[in-house]
Image (cartoon, rainbow, N blue to C red):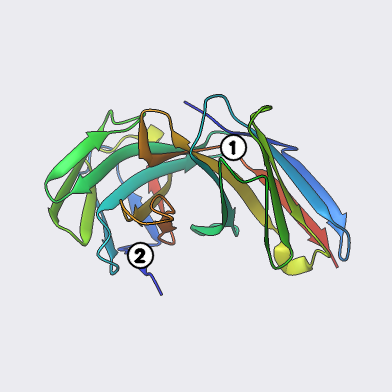
């Protein structure tokens, strides 16, 4: 069962622009994570934000979390062609926090 | 660096064959996972193991079994492969303690085609 739903499904931008992806989820969480997947490869962890945090930064990444709206956003600033990938949010499962439930992802295309 | 390896990047099998997908991690993680990834459906958990010889069904276990005889190795078995099992299979592992306990580390994936 899907917990996270990303929006938009696909996003195309020019290098240097900012990219914003959103994630909504259904049940209460301990943390929310964002992962990146290059085409045909495994996922790579980007950032984790806990339920008691509202914003977190890592390099060009900024993640926000609004637990009242059950939503999160991932902002990539000054995007590069190398940022082209699919991005997934993941929340811990309500019945077993060792497990993650992944959304369907946002495909980001950054044109040089 | 954590490393999760999978035995094959690409695999082609025939309907009815028994298929073994192997995953090995080198970080002494307690948890290991098998997912399949299909377009439009995201990642779906097939099986989860939280310790040696321990396993738990995920969302789509039908047609699959798993084996974890050693902590570092988690195998996914397709007892009798079918065409609807053509997919990308991803293995992951994680700790079950610590600050970022459920951050998962993924292998490169195995793209399985069943003819």
Identify the secondary structure beneath mark 1: loop
Q: Residues within 10 Å of mark 2 (few under 14, many from 20)?
A: many
The chain to which mark 1 is attached is A
> Residue A18 at what x, y percent from top left?
85, 56
> Residue B81 at what x, y percent from top left?
28, 38
> Residue A51 at what x, y percent from top left?
56, 40
Towards the viewer: A77 or A65: A65
The chain to which mark 2 is attached is B
> Residue A58 at what x, y percent from top left?
66, 64
Compared to A28, does B107 lie above or below?
below
Which quadrant is home to the N terminus of chain B? bottom left
- The tag on residue B4 is 2
Q: Are marks 2 and 1 on the same chain?
A: no
Towards the viewer: B61 or B32: B32
Identity of the residue drawn at 60% across and 60% down: A38
Q: Residues within 10 Å of mark 1 (few under 14, many from 20)?
A: many
Residue picked out by circle 1: A104
Identity of the residue drawn at 42% across and 58% down: B106
Identify the secondary structure beneath mark 2: strand
In this image, A84 relative to B92: left or right?
right
């Amino acid at each position: 069962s899907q917990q996270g739903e990303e929006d938009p499904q696909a996003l195309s931008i020019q290098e240097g622009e900012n990219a914003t992806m959103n994630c909504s989820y259904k049940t209460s969480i301990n943390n929310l994570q964002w992962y990146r997947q290059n085409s045909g490869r495994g996922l790579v962890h980007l950032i984790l934000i806990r339920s008691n945090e509202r914003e977190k930064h890592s390099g060009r990444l900024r993640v926000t979390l609004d637990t009242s709206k059950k939503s999160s956003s991932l902002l990539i600033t000054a995007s590069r062609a190398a940022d082209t990938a699919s991005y997934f949010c993941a929340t811990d499962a309500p019945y077993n926090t060792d497990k993650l439930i992944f959304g369907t992802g946002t495909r980001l295309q950054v044109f040089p | 660096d954590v490393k999760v390896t999978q035995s094959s990047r690409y695999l082609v099998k025939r309907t009815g064959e028994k298929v073994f997908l192997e995953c090995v991690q080198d970080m002494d993680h307690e948890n290991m996972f098998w997912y399949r990834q299909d377009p439009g459906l995201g990642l779906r958990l097939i099986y989860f193991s939280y310790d040696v010889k321990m396993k738990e069904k995920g969302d789509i276990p039908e047609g699959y079994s798993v084996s974890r005889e050693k902590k570092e190795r988690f195998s996914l078995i397709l007892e009798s492969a079918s065409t609807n099992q053509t997919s990308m299979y991803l293995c992951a592992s994680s700790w079950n303690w610590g600050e970022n306990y459920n951050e998962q580390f993924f292998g490169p994936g195995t793209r399985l085609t069943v003819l």
